[in-house]
Image (tube, rainbow, N blue to C red):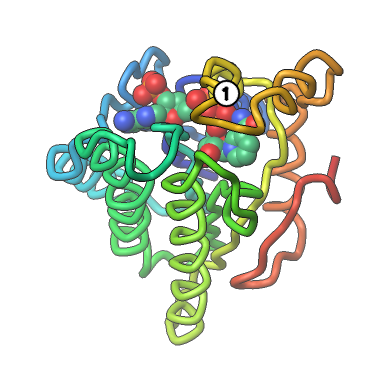
Amino acid sequence: MKIVIISGGSKGLGLALCQQYLANGYQAFEFSRSATHPFSVQCDFAQPETALAQMTATFAELSRTSYDEIVIINNAALLGPIGPSARKAPTDLITHLNVNITSAILFLSQAISAFQAHTCPKIIANISSGAAIKNISGWSLYCASKAGLEHYIRTVAIEQNEQAQPFTAINIDPDLIDTDMQAGIRQASRADFPALDRFIQRKENGILRPPAQVAAAVIRIISSPIANGARYDITDFV
Ligand SMILES: NC(=O)c1ccc[n+]([C@@H]2O[C@H](COP(=O)([O-])OP(=O)(O)OC[C@H]3O[C@@H](n4cnc5c(N)ncnc54)[C@H](OP(=O)(O)O)[C@@H]3O)[C@@H](O)[C@H]2O)c1
Protein backbone atom coordinates (compact mmCIF):
# COMPACT_ATOMS: atom_id res chain seq x y z
CA MET A 1 0.00 0.00 0.00
CA LYS A 2 1.19 3.53 -0.84
CA ILE A 3 0.20 6.55 1.26
CA VAL A 4 0.17 10.30 0.67
CA ILE A 5 -0.40 12.80 3.49
CA ILE A 6 -1.06 16.41 2.41
CA SER A 7 -1.57 19.61 4.36
CA GLY A 8 -4.28 21.81 2.87
CA GLY A 9 -5.94 19.20 0.67
CA SER A 10 -9.49 20.55 0.97
CA LYS A 11 -9.34 22.71 -2.18
CA GLY A 12 -7.02 24.15 -4.80
CA LEU A 13 -3.78 22.35 -5.61
CA GLY A 14 -3.95 20.18 -2.46
CA LEU A 15 -7.38 18.77 -3.39
CA ALA A 16 -6.23 18.04 -6.97
CA LEU A 17 -3.21 16.20 -5.52
CA CYS A 18 -5.43 14.12 -3.20
CA GLN A 19 -7.80 13.24 -6.06
CA GLN A 20 -4.99 12.19 -8.42
CA TYR A 21 -3.13 10.17 -5.80
CA LEU A 22 -6.39 8.40 -4.87
CA ALA A 23 -6.99 7.63 -8.57
CA ASN A 24 -3.45 6.20 -8.68
CA GLY A 25 -4.30 3.75 -5.88
CA TYR A 26 -2.71 5.59 -2.95
CA GLN A 27 -4.32 5.93 0.44
CA ALA A 28 -4.70 9.71 0.97
CA PHE A 29 -5.09 11.94 4.03
CA GLU A 30 -5.33 15.71 4.14
CA PHE A 31 -5.28 18.23 7.01
CA SER A 32 -7.40 21.41 6.71
CA ARG A 33 -9.89 23.58 8.57
CA SER A 34 -12.91 22.82 6.39
CA ALA A 35 -12.03 19.09 6.16
CA THR A 36 -14.95 18.33 3.85
CA HIS A 37 -13.66 15.10 2.30
CA PRO A 38 -13.77 11.46 3.46
CA PHE A 39 -9.94 11.59 3.56
CA SER A 40 -9.84 14.81 5.66
CA VAL A 41 -8.53 15.41 9.17
CA GLN A 42 -9.88 18.63 10.69
CA CYS A 43 -6.98 20.82 11.78
CA ASP A 44 -6.33 24.58 12.02
CA PHE A 45 -2.68 25.46 11.36
CA ALA A 46 -3.29 28.92 12.86
CA GLN A 47 -3.44 27.13 16.25
CA PRO A 48 -0.11 25.24 16.27
CA GLU A 49 -0.42 23.53 19.65
CA THR A 50 -3.87 22.10 18.91
CA ALA A 51 -2.78 21.22 15.38
CA LEU A 52 0.27 19.43 16.79
CA ALA A 53 -1.90 17.17 18.95
CA GLN A 54 -4.13 16.29 15.97
CA MET A 55 -1.18 15.62 13.67
CA THR A 56 0.70 13.55 16.24
CA ALA A 57 -2.32 11.35 16.93
CA THR A 58 -2.98 10.81 13.21
CA PHE A 59 0.67 10.04 12.38
CA ALA A 60 0.97 7.65 15.36
CA GLU A 61 -2.03 5.69 14.07
CA LEU A 62 -0.87 5.65 10.43
CA SER A 63 2.73 4.72 11.28
CA ARG A 64 1.61 1.34 12.69
CA THR A 65 1.08 0.09 9.10
CA SER A 66 3.90 -0.74 6.71
CA TYR A 67 3.82 0.89 3.27
CA ASP A 68 5.38 0.49 -0.17
CA GLU A 69 5.84 4.28 -0.46
CA ILE A 70 5.24 7.28 1.81
CA VAL A 71 4.70 10.77 0.34
CA ILE A 72 4.37 13.80 2.65
CA ILE A 73 3.36 17.07 0.95
CA ASN A 74 3.45 20.42 2.78
CA ASN A 75 0.96 22.46 0.76
CA ALA A 76 -1.24 24.49 3.16
CA ALA A 77 -0.35 28.18 3.13
CA LEU A 78 -1.72 31.68 3.43
CA LEU A 79 -0.60 34.56 1.24
CA GLY A 80 -1.93 37.43 3.35
CA PRO A 81 -1.84 39.79 4.99
CA ILE A 82 -0.84 41.77 1.89
CA GLY A 83 0.60 45.26 2.34
CA PRO A 84 3.61 47.15 3.62
CA SER A 85 5.21 45.45 6.59
CA ALA A 86 4.53 48.22 9.13
CA ARG A 87 0.80 48.33 8.24
CA LYS A 88 0.19 44.67 9.01
CA ALA A 89 -1.83 43.93 12.14
CA PRO A 90 0.29 41.96 14.60
CA THR A 91 -2.44 39.32 15.01
CA ASP A 92 -2.54 38.74 11.22
CA LEU A 93 1.24 38.57 11.16
CA ILE A 94 1.23 35.91 13.90
CA THR A 95 -1.49 33.91 12.11
CA HIS A 96 0.55 33.93 8.89
CA LEU A 97 3.70 32.72 10.64
CA ASN A 98 1.74 30.08 12.58
CA VAL A 99 0.25 28.64 9.37
CA ASN A 100 3.16 28.98 6.94
CA ILE A 101 6.10 28.36 9.29
CA THR A 102 5.27 26.98 12.76
CA SER A 103 2.55 24.47 11.87
CA ALA A 104 4.18 23.62 8.52
CA ILE A 105 7.39 22.66 10.33
CA LEU A 106 5.40 20.80 13.01
CA PHE A 107 3.60 18.88 10.24
CA LEU A 108 6.86 17.91 8.56
CA SER A 109 8.87 17.21 11.71
CA GLN A 110 6.12 15.02 13.19
CA ALA A 111 5.78 13.12 9.92
CA ILE A 112 9.55 12.54 9.81
CA SER A 113 9.53 11.35 13.41
CA ALA A 114 6.58 9.00 12.89
CA PHE A 115 7.81 7.41 9.66
CA GLN A 116 11.63 7.64 9.96
CA ALA A 117 12.10 3.93 10.66
CA HIS A 118 9.92 2.80 7.73
CA THR A 119 12.07 1.12 5.10
CA CYS A 120 10.09 1.97 1.92
CA PRO A 121 10.88 4.93 -0.40
CA LYS A 122 9.86 8.12 1.46
CA ILE A 123 9.47 11.60 0.00
CA ILE A 124 8.85 15.01 1.53
CA ALA A 125 7.73 17.64 -0.98
CA ASN A 126 7.28 21.26 0.06
CA ILE A 127 5.00 23.27 -2.24
CA SER A 128 6.90 26.53 -2.41
CA SER A 129 6.54 29.59 -4.62
CA GLY A 130 8.50 31.93 -6.85
CA ALA A 131 8.12 34.30 -3.88
CA ALA A 132 10.71 32.19 -2.02
CA ILE A 133 13.40 33.50 -4.36
CA LYS A 134 11.85 36.81 -5.60
CA ASN A 135 10.98 39.88 -3.53
CA ILE A 136 7.46 41.21 -4.20
CA SER A 137 6.29 44.51 -2.69
CA GLY A 138 3.40 43.90 -0.26
CA TRP A 139 4.23 40.23 0.18
CA SER A 140 7.01 40.48 2.79
CA LEU A 141 5.53 37.80 5.06
CA TYR A 142 4.78 35.37 2.22
CA CYS A 143 8.24 35.87 0.69
CA ALA A 144 9.83 35.33 4.11
CA SER A 145 7.78 32.25 5.02
CA LYS A 146 8.27 30.58 1.63
CA ALA A 147 12.03 31.28 1.71
CA GLY A 148 12.20 30.00 5.31
CA LEU A 149 10.47 26.73 4.46
CA GLU A 150 12.72 26.16 1.45
CA HIS A 151 15.77 26.58 3.67
CA TYR A 152 14.23 24.23 6.26
CA ILE A 153 13.76 21.57 3.56
CA ARG A 154 17.36 21.89 2.36
CA THR A 155 18.57 21.43 5.93
CA VAL A 156 16.27 18.44 6.48
CA ALA A 157 17.72 16.95 3.29
CA ILE A 158 21.24 17.14 4.76
CA GLU A 159 20.03 15.62 8.04
CA GLN A 160 18.33 12.79 6.17
CA ASN A 161 21.63 11.86 4.49
CA GLU A 162 22.74 10.70 7.95
CA GLN A 163 19.72 8.44 8.50
CA ALA A 164 19.63 4.69 7.91
CA GLN A 165 16.16 4.96 6.32
CA PRO A 166 16.20 8.46 4.85
CA PHE A 167 13.46 10.61 3.38
CA THR A 168 14.21 12.48 0.16
CA ALA A 169 13.20 16.12 0.73
CA ILE A 170 12.56 18.57 -2.11
CA ASN A 171 11.04 21.98 -2.82
CA ILE A 172 8.62 22.43 -5.73
CA ASP A 173 7.68 25.78 -7.30
CA PRO A 174 4.14 25.29 -8.70
CA ASP A 175 4.13 28.55 -10.73
CA LEU A 176 0.70 30.20 -11.21
CA ILE A 177 -2.44 28.18 -10.32
CA ASP A 178 -6.06 29.22 -10.79
CA THR A 179 -7.21 28.85 -7.16
CA ASP A 180 -8.79 30.83 -4.32
CA MET A 181 -5.31 32.08 -3.41
CA GLN A 182 -5.03 33.89 -6.77
CA ALA A 183 -8.62 35.20 -6.39
CA GLY A 184 -7.60 36.65 -3.01
CA ILE A 185 -4.55 38.34 -4.54
CA ARG A 186 -6.78 40.06 -7.13
CA GLN A 187 -8.89 41.52 -4.30
CA ALA A 188 -5.92 43.40 -2.76
CA SER A 189 -5.80 47.20 -3.05
CA ARG A 190 -3.30 48.89 -5.37
CA ALA A 191 -1.95 50.77 -2.34
CA ASP A 192 -1.10 47.50 -0.61
CA PHE A 193 -0.01 45.61 -3.72
CA PRO A 194 1.64 47.61 -6.54
CA ALA A 195 1.72 44.59 -8.92
CA LEU A 196 -2.09 44.12 -8.72
CA ASP A 197 -2.79 44.91 -12.39
CA ARG A 198 -0.23 42.34 -13.57
CA PHE A 199 -2.02 39.64 -11.56
CA ILE A 200 -5.45 40.71 -12.89
CA GLN A 201 -4.07 40.55 -16.46
CA ARG A 202 -2.64 37.08 -15.88
CA LYS A 203 -6.12 35.80 -15.01
CA GLU A 204 -7.73 37.64 -17.95
CA ASN A 205 -5.08 36.31 -20.35
CA GLY A 206 -5.63 32.70 -19.21
CA ILE A 207 -2.08 32.29 -17.93
CA LEU A 208 -3.06 30.61 -14.63
CA ARG A 209 -2.93 26.81 -14.82
CA PRO A 210 -5.81 24.61 -13.61
CA PRO A 211 -4.98 22.87 -10.29
CA ALA A 212 -5.33 19.43 -11.93
CA GLN A 213 -2.61 20.25 -14.48
CA VAL A 214 -0.24 21.47 -11.77
CA ALA A 215 -1.01 18.46 -9.55
CA ALA A 216 -0.14 16.10 -12.42
CA ALA A 217 3.20 17.90 -12.86
CA VAL A 218 3.91 17.76 -9.10
CA ILE A 219 3.23 14.01 -9.11
CA ARG A 220 5.46 13.61 -12.18
CA ILE A 221 8.30 15.35 -10.28
CA ILE A 222 7.80 13.27 -7.13
CA SER A 223 7.70 10.05 -9.19
CA SER A 224 10.88 10.87 -11.14
CA PRO A 225 14.46 10.24 -9.89
CA ILE A 226 14.66 13.33 -7.64
CA ALA A 227 17.77 14.71 -5.94
CA ASN A 228 17.66 15.15 -2.16
CA GLY A 229 17.49 18.88 -1.28
CA ALA A 230 16.81 20.01 -4.86
CA ARG A 231 14.34 22.68 -6.04
CA TYR A 232 12.04 21.75 -8.94
CA ASP A 233 9.93 24.06 -11.09
CA ILE A 234 6.71 22.58 -12.51
CA THR A 235 7.20 24.55 -15.74
CA ASP A 236 9.83 21.91 -16.63
CA PHE A 237 7.27 19.10 -16.07
CA VAL A 238 3.91 20.31 -17.56
N1 LIG B 1 -2.18 29.69 -6.47
C1 LIG B 1 -0.98 30.05 -6.94
O1 LIG B 1 -0.85 30.72 -7.98
C2 LIG B 1 0.26 29.64 -6.19
C3 LIG B 1 1.49 30.07 -6.71
C4 LIG B 1 2.67 29.70 -6.05
C5 LIG B 1 2.59 28.89 -4.93
N2 LIG B 1 1.40 28.47 -4.47
C6 LIG B 1 1.38 27.60 -3.29
O2 LIG B 1 0.64 26.43 -3.59
C7 LIG B 1 0.05 25.90 -2.39
C8 LIG B 1 -1.44 25.67 -2.62
O3 LIG B 1 -2.04 26.92 -2.90
P1 LIG B 1 -3.51 27.07 -3.49
O4 LIG B 1 -3.44 28.12 -4.52
O5 LIG B 1 -4.08 25.74 -3.81
O6 LIG B 1 -4.24 27.69 -2.20
P2 LIG B 1 -5.77 27.65 -1.72
O7 LIG B 1 -6.67 27.33 -2.84
O8 LIG B 1 -5.95 28.90 -0.96
O9 LIG B 1 -5.76 26.39 -0.72
C9 LIG B 1 -5.03 26.44 0.47
C10 LIG B 1 -5.19 25.16 1.26
O10 LIG B 1 -4.54 25.37 2.53
C11 LIG B 1 -5.50 25.13 3.57
N3 LIG B 1 -5.29 26.04 4.69
C12 LIG B 1 -5.25 27.39 4.66
N4 LIG B 1 -5.17 27.88 5.90
C13 LIG B 1 -5.19 26.81 6.74
C14 LIG B 1 -5.16 26.66 8.15
N5 LIG B 1 -5.16 27.72 8.98
N6 LIG B 1 -5.16 25.41 8.67
C15 LIG B 1 -5.21 24.33 7.86
N7 LIG B 1 -5.24 24.40 6.51
C16 LIG B 1 -5.24 25.63 5.96
C17 LIG B 1 -6.87 25.36 2.93
O11 LIG B 1 -7.86 24.59 3.60
P3 LIG B 1 -9.03 25.22 4.51
O12 LIG B 1 -9.38 26.55 3.95
O13 LIG B 1 -10.11 24.20 4.42
O14 LIG B 1 -8.42 25.29 5.87
C18 LIG B 1 -6.64 24.82 1.52
O15 LIG B 1 -6.84 23.42 1.50
C19 LIG B 1 0.37 26.94 -1.31
O16 LIG B 1 1.49 26.51 -0.58
C20 LIG B 1 0.69 28.19 -2.09
O17 LIG B 1 1.55 29.06 -1.37
C21 LIG B 1 0.22 28.84 -5.07
- Furthest toward the front, the residue is 191
Residue drawn at (66%, 49%) of the image? 130
> In the rendered structure, which amino acid carries the disc numbered 1?
Arg
Where does the image place residue 107, in percent across and percent down from the top left?
33, 49
Circle 1 sits in a helix, a strand or a loop, which is it? loop
Q: Could you tell me if residue 212 is visible in this image? A: yes
User: Which residue is disc 1 drawn over?
Assistant: 190
Residue 172 position (above or below residue 50): below
Q: Nearer the viewer, residue 191 or 91?
A: 191
Residue 166 position (above or below residue 90): below
Residue 230 position (above or below residue 235): below
Q: Nearer the viewer, residue 96 or 195?
A: 195
Q: Nearer the viewer, residue 106 or 59?
A: 106
- Quadrant location, the C terminus: top right
Where does the image place residue 190, in percent across and percent down from the top left?
57, 23
Where does the image place residue 10, in percent across and percent down from the top left?
45, 21
Residue drawn at (77%, 28%) of the image? 213
Indicate left or right for 14 with 48 as reference. right
Q: Nearer the viewer, residue 147 or 128?
A: 147
Crowding at label 1, few (<14), some or many (≥20) Cα neighbours within 10 Å? few
- Furthest toward the bottom, the residue is 162
**Quadrant assignment, res 41:** top left
Residue drawn at (69%, 28%) of the image? 177
Indicate left or right for 62 with 230 as reference. left
Indicate left or right for 212 with 189 as reference. right
Where does the image place residue 1, in percent across and percent down from the top left?
52, 44
| The residue carrying mark 1 has its beta carbon less than 8 Å from ligand 1 | no
